[in-house]
Image: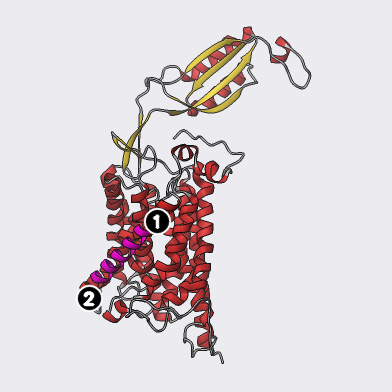
Amino acid sequence: MSTPDFTINNTWMLISTILVFLMHLGFAALEAGLTRAKNTVNILFKNTSIVAIGLLTYALCGFSLMYPGDFILGDWLGFAGFGLNPGENWNTPSYNVGYTYYTDFIFQAMFAATAATIVSGAVAERVKLSSFLLFSTLYVAIIYPIAGSWKWGGGWLDQLGFYDFAGSTLVHGVGGWAALVGAYVLGPRIGKYTRKGAHPIKGHNMPLTAIGVFLLWFGWYGFNGGSVLSANPGAVSTVFVTTTLSAAGGVIGSMILSWYLSNKPDLSMILNGSLAGLVGITAGADVIDPATSILVGLISGLLVVSSVLYLDSRKIDDPVGAISVHLICGLWGTLAVGIFSTDHSISIQLLGVLSYGVFCLASSMLIFYLIDKLLGLRVDEQEEIVGLDISEHDMEAYAGFQIFNVE
Amino acid sequence: MKLIIAIIQPEELPEIKEELLKNKIYKFTVSNALGQGKEVPLTEVYRGIAHEISLLKKVRLEIAVNDEYVDNAVDSIIKVAQGAKDKGRGKIFILPVEECIRLRTNERGKEAIG
């Protein structure tokens, strides 16, 4: 029997699911905007196929790896069987007061697809399509859900008291570590680092980038708001406020630092800054108070700009700033829970962050290494110069438009 | 018959167009171009990295005229562009034209241009 509360809760969870789904359009627009016109079809192709891969693998095995119920190997690994197994009472409050089994699955499946998408921006404009799709499939089907089970599935980190509300580490950190490894093993795009230092390779469409960022911010109300796992009025409205204030703080933090460092205010940096603030507050959106959330956002904004510049100085080429936004601010946000919430310990937060780091670095290195042996990771030089749209897809993004391909 | 090719600053185009019309030159073609001349390169900043842009945005203006209109055309362009202090304002090239054909009527030469 369904009660009004159950129906309201479940409806909010499904609305949140739709909002998180929309974030995929945000990622697609943002990544297309910050890269060159000759690689746009390829970016959109990747971002569309990853959503499909993320959702299908989550239905096949991801959901039951991430929420196994009982663990097989200590509290590190469990598996509840292939496919979806709703069981009895799946659609009543006795499954969960906040949602049905299928709502649970589809909300979490959208998250899984998000984690996989984070990598695509960092490896853009040079990764071989087939290799990237293979990597994403393995990473989102196996690594993401196992990592997630440690906390959200009730595994060992959960039992130690590690806290990650909506996934600063579990989603953004896990995606971010793979993005770092991907950008590192692929090497920079041709022409990015010359003897004279870093040479900018400009994104071809700032309006599209801005649209992408606003769509992501919009979707984040579902990402964080839905992570309350019910329509609890107090909790959801608190999370809306902390999420918003941190995003705003991120814009201001990145504005101050980029304006100070380069004498001119940089649009791409404040767009990254808003996402930085969102990633930063994601771990503690329900336990950090609104005033503190502004500080979390401001620091995220400072971090994202410093990180973009630092990665460039280390010749790690991340065309869209995915590592800085998702990994660096994901780490920061997870630690911020330990710093600003009296109920959580900084040392356990640190342990969680390090454990995810080791697991994700090792597994993504292994997967990238194997794929490199099997298929190769990078398109050849001529293909990269011509652009992946033509070399990988025999198709152009702007047929009928005049595009200046001079870099 | 002459073909006048002028490389001008994009922001000068509206005024030059007005001058051309005043001087009874009604037919021309305009396209975007990138070029570098004597000007100081522009410094742009993208994601914290400052860099010099030496290929700058220009407009390429093409006007085919009968000989007696060459001065009109050139004067229109110079009137707007002359006197600027900064370098790299552009150039005018004048080339002889062998033949001109109007597509609709198959007229040739002087009639086709006018």
Near mark 1 (Cα within 10 A), the count class, few <14, some 14-19 or many ≥20, is some
Left or right of A24: which side holds A330? Answer: left
Magenta-highlighted residues: A350-366
What residue appears at the point 48 percent right and 40 percent down from the top-left corner?
A: A383
Quarter-wise, where is residue A296 in the image? bottom left
Quarter-wise, where is residue A88 in the image? bottom right
Quarter of the image for the C terminus of chain A: give it.
top left
C-alpha distance separating marks 1 and 2 = 38 Å
Q: Kindly report the secondary structure that dominates the magenta region of the rendered protein.
A: helix
What residue appears at the point 29 percent right and 49 percent down from the top-left corner?
A: A311
Query: Label 1's element?
Result: helix
Q: Where A397 sits versus A326, above or below?
A: above
Label annotation for residue A345: 2
Of the residues under marks 1 and 2, which one precedes in the sequence? 2
Q: Position of residue A294 (x, y in %)?
A: 30, 65
Res B93 visible: yes
Quarter-wise, where is residue A163 in the image? bottom left
- Closer to us: mark 1 or mark 2? 1
Q: Position of residue A226 (x, y in %)?
A: 45, 74
Quarter of the image for the N terminus of chain A: give it.
bottom right
Query: Label 2's element?
Result: loop
Q: Where A293 sits versus A390, above or below?
A: below
Of all residues, the one furthest to the top in this rendering is: B68
